[in-house]
């Protein structure tokens, strides 16, 4: 953004209103589709490929996000966001009309490549129009939109699938996306247009795509129970290692790298990336494991388990808003992050001490966990954005978003593996998690889930250590 460009409060509110709709479309898609997976499998067959309807989207989104972030720094957010939303609308049509499971997975991958970076570009746009100290307040609005979409997605998806079939889940995204395109095209006209013509590091983009897609595929297969000794897993691991090393070499010598090494070497960037990766490891991993634990521990219905996860979802935007106001008034971003981490760690410790069927204590713990997570997530993003020049805002935001996706996949696969290992002695030959839990005693299941929570606690301790080692330089730009 041009530093001389100032936006009025009315203009900022108009732009954010358009961004909120774009984020809602992108965020609601994942939870909307998850409810329809069983119907999709029954209709199209090939149930063994069903997990890739979700995993393909996430892997492609992780690949596309850093590339979109860099291109938006060079050519402006408006063009890239409109193109991304347009591709999302077209692939939604293709998904609704999919004649086979393979075609649907292809459309979902293309949907991730086109629409997966919308949230990161919207967050980068906030940094373009709002001073650093005020960004936390407005990022809280985006977090609230994301949480609302996550809550509404399963409800809307269930109704649409029940009334009109699973194809309606994808079809309903088309008018919503077209509405978002109209709003974004209208409100982002006032953003300054960049006319930078620089060479694009296409080789670096290709190597980064291979590295991230190999990593996401590896984590997805691990989460489905595949072992590292399998030939396909070893091939993915080798592909990830070689492409990552080659990508690092390429980015060091490229005149205009996709992810500049100088950005990643900044303490104000890599520390927030660690924070976000670990927090989403815990959030998404436990969001997948805890409903299973609740049903095993005495909750009989899926609906009841979902309701008990609601305080976690609501706590995240509340924490984001609180962190935004705190940062705006004091600039004490480091203190905000430490407070959020302390809340997260204390709630995880409490979670190891209470049974999962104790409703009242669990609701309090889940709410506190969401509150602390929201504080860490939003403040870490604002710190990263304020630590780089304006010309690198897009790629920095995209890198943080990519860490969020990788951390989520890593959390699901790792915590599922921990649960399998903790229960494997009871039934060594059983590979299905649900059946394995039905075979063990309640006491064994409770101990296994405690091991899962302790793993999440250990991972969330890492940001605390890195923040202490990083010193007071973290967030110095916001304090000043």
Image (cartoon, rainbow, N blue to C red):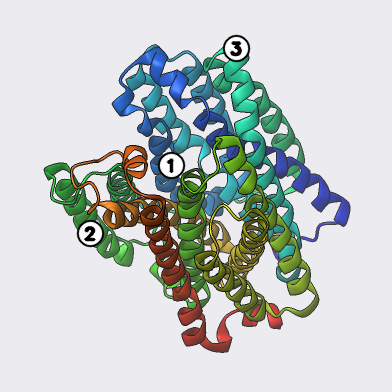
Point out which mark residue 58 bears. Answer: 1
Is the N terminus in the top left, top right, bottom left or bottom right quadrant? bottom right
* Label 2 secondary element: helix
Above or below — where is 165 with respect to 258? above
- Residue 358 coordinates in the image, percent (x, y): 60, 56
- Residue 108 coordinates in the image, percent (x, y): 43, 29
Dot 1 or dot 3, earlier in sequence: 1
Q: CA distance from mark 2 to mark 3?
A: 48 Å
Point out which mark residue 354 bears. Answer: none
* Label 3 secondary element: helix
| Nearer mark to the viewer, of 2 and 3 | 3
- Residue 431 coordinates in the image, percent (x, y): 25, 41
On the rendered structure, is 162 left or right of 223? right
Point out which mark residue 246 bears. Answer: 2
Residue that label 3 marks: 164
Residue found at x 38% / y 55%: 415
């Amino acid at each position: 953004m041009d530093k001389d460009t100032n936006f009025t409060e009315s203009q900022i509110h108009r732009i954010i209103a358009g961004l909120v709709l774009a984020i809602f479309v992108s965020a609601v898609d994942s939870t909307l589709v998850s409810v329809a997976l069983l119907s999709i499998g029954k209709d199209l067959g090939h149930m063994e490929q069903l997990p890739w309807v979700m995993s393909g989207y996430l892997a492609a989104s992780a690949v596309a996000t850093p590339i979109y972030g860099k291109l938006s720094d060079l050519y402006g957010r408006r063009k890239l966001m409109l193109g991304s939303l347009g591709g999302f609308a077209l692939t939604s049509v293709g998904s609704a009309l999919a004649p086979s499971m393979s075609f649907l997975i292809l459309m979902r991958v293309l949907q991730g490549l086109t629409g997966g970076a919308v949230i990161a570009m919207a967050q980068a746009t906030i940094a373009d129009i709002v001073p650093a100290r005020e960004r936390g307040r407005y990022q809280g609005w985006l977090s609230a939109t994301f949480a609302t979409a996550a809550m509404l997605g399963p409800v809307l998806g269930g109704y649409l699938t029940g009334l009109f079939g699973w194809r309606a889940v994808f079809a309903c995204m088309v008018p919503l996306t077209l509405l978002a395109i109209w709003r974004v095209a209208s409100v982002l006209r006032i953003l300054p247009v960049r006319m930078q013509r620089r060479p694009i590091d296409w080789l670096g983009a290709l190597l980064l795509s291979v590295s991230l897609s190999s990593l996401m595929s590896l984590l997805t297969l691990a989460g489905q129970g595949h072992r590292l000794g399998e030939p396909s897993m070893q091939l993915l691991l080798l592909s990830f290692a070689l492409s990552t090393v080659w990508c690092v070499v390429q980015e060091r010598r490229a005149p205009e790298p996709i992810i500049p090494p100088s950005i990643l070497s900044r303490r104000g960037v890599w520390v927030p990336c660690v924070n976000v990766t670990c927090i989403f490891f815990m959030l998404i991993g436990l969001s997948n494991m805890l409903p299973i634990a609740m049903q095993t521990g005495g909750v009989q219905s899926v609906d009841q388990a979902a309701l008990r996860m609601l305080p976690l979802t609501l706590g995240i935007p509340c924490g984001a808003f609180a962190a935004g106001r705190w940062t705006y008034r004091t600039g004490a971003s480091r203190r905000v992050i430490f407070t959020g981490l302390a809340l997260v760690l204390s709630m995880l410790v409490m979670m190891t001490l209470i049974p999962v069927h104790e409703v009242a204590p669990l609701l309090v713990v889940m709410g506190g966990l969401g509150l602390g997570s929201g504080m860490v997530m939003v403040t870490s993003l604002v710190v990263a954005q304020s630590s780089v020049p304006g010309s690198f805002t897009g790629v920095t935001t995209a890198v943080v978003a990519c860490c969020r996706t990788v951390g989520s996949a890593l959390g699901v696969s790792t915590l599922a593996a921990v649960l399998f290992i903790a229960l494997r002695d009871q039934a060594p030959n059983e590979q299905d998690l649900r059946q394995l839990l039905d075979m063990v005693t309640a006491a064994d299941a409770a101990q296994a889930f405690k091991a899962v929570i302790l793993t999440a606690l250990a991972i969330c301790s890492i940001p605390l250590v890195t923040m202490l080692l990083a010193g007071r330089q973290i967030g110095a730009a916001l304090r000043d």
